[in-house]
Image: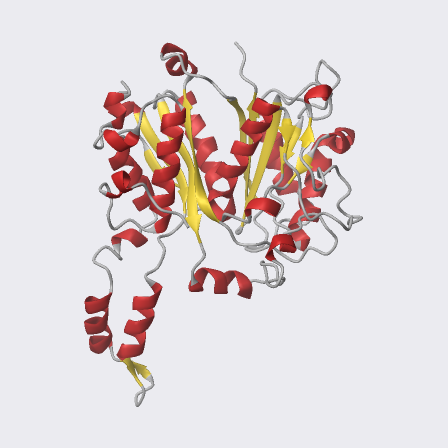
Amino acid sequence: GFELDPALVEFAPDAHLNSRFAMSAAASAWKSAGLGDVRSVGGDAARRAKIEPGRLGIYLGAGEGTPDFDNFAASNLMGWDADARDTDTARWAEAALARLRHASETEQEPNMTAQHLADVFGARGPSFNCMTACAASTQATGEAAEILRNGDADVMLAGGSHTMIHPLGMTGFIRLTAMSSRRDDPATASRPFDSTRDGFVMGEGAGVLVLETLEHATRRGARILAEVAGYGASADAYRITDIQPDGVGAGAAMRQALEQAEIDPATPDPTGRPPVQYISAHGTGTKENDSIETRAVKLVFGEQAKRIPFSSVKSMFGHLIQAAGAVELMTCIKAIETGWVPPTINLRHPDPECDLDYVPNSARDMRERGGVDVCLSNSFGFGGQNNTIIVKRFSL
């Protein structure tokens, strides 16, 4: 049901769905940040927002381009030599040249989504795309914040975009047994931390944030929603599809982020609240992830772990793969803004190995408990990549 605003199509008429998701999300973020309406600026958004183009950067965790599956499969069939039981390369090439879209090769390049955003916004500063699976957009956002801290840009568009809802993507994750088999009941299939969980439900989409240095934001009178206070990254160096069972790798990313944010995970805050008032779980709903992430949180926070609301919005959004972390970070920012934390839905059967406060089935109003000032968001990717971001309520 998604349609890109026609005014943005002109920037990249052949853009694949990942790029279209990202352009739409970035345009919304730009407008929400008070920087103008991207639709009317003709690729000159930076200058019209009075941002030096060389000081505006892009850092995405965007997935590979959506394959032109139908035409590629048709070319394979037309190029197949049944007698030789092999592909006739010349015949395949003739069919592919006739059927595949002109931009099919360039749109498969992982950097193209970031390039499209650079074109739309007139961004001539640092531009990167991060390919670290389910941790990608959290890593991209954390690295974008580091670029700002290092003085290499004033403004960064950061986040992620991905769709794996195509035959190759869906088949691949089914073969990995990472997805729920409850195809007859999709509304309740995603059930992180539940004892009957059997995998995630695939989602798709994008999340893009506008990050700025404090000096730039205050100079233009921006409404600051939150501060990126800490970022951590680690690798398990264990197995491609499994988290390190003892949770040490995931814990290392959390500890790094907490240290940068100057938060002691074992000590309540000055008001007596836990040191972090909400954790956005990676929470895929796979057997291994949820119990190991629980173990890692207890390893880091000790006795404070049981006091912290800790939920998985994948139970509601599905798993957006490379875009997941950015969207989940937005839920943290909304928790700070509203004082409500989101639930883990479909949590009906407690798992003895998952014994923390997962905010089961209903959102929780935290305002009578002092609200939410500090949130931590986890993302763990296939291959063993672990990333954590901490956001705080901003105050001078």
| Image quadrant in which you'd find residue 73 | bottom left
Q: Is residue 29 above or below residue 323?
A: above
Residue 302 x, y percent position in the rendering: 76, 32
Name the residue nearer the viewer: 216 or 303.
Answer: 216
| Image quadrant in which you'd find residue 114 | top left
Residue 220 x, y percent position in the rendering: 36, 13
- The residue that appears at 59% across and 45% down in the rendered structure is 316
Name the residue nearer the viewer: 345 or 211.
Answer: 345
Residue 162 x, y percent position in the rendering: 43, 48
Q: Is residue 149 above or below residue 73?
A: above
- The residue that appears at 36% across and 46% down in the rendered structure is 3
Q: Is residue 264 above or below residue 270?
A: below
- The residue that appears at 38% across and 32% down in the rendered structure is 28
Residue furthest out toward the right:
352
Q: Is residue 358 visible?
A: yes
Residue 62 x, y percent position in the rendering: 40, 45
Image position of 345 (left or right of 148): right
Image position of 163 (left or right of 65): right
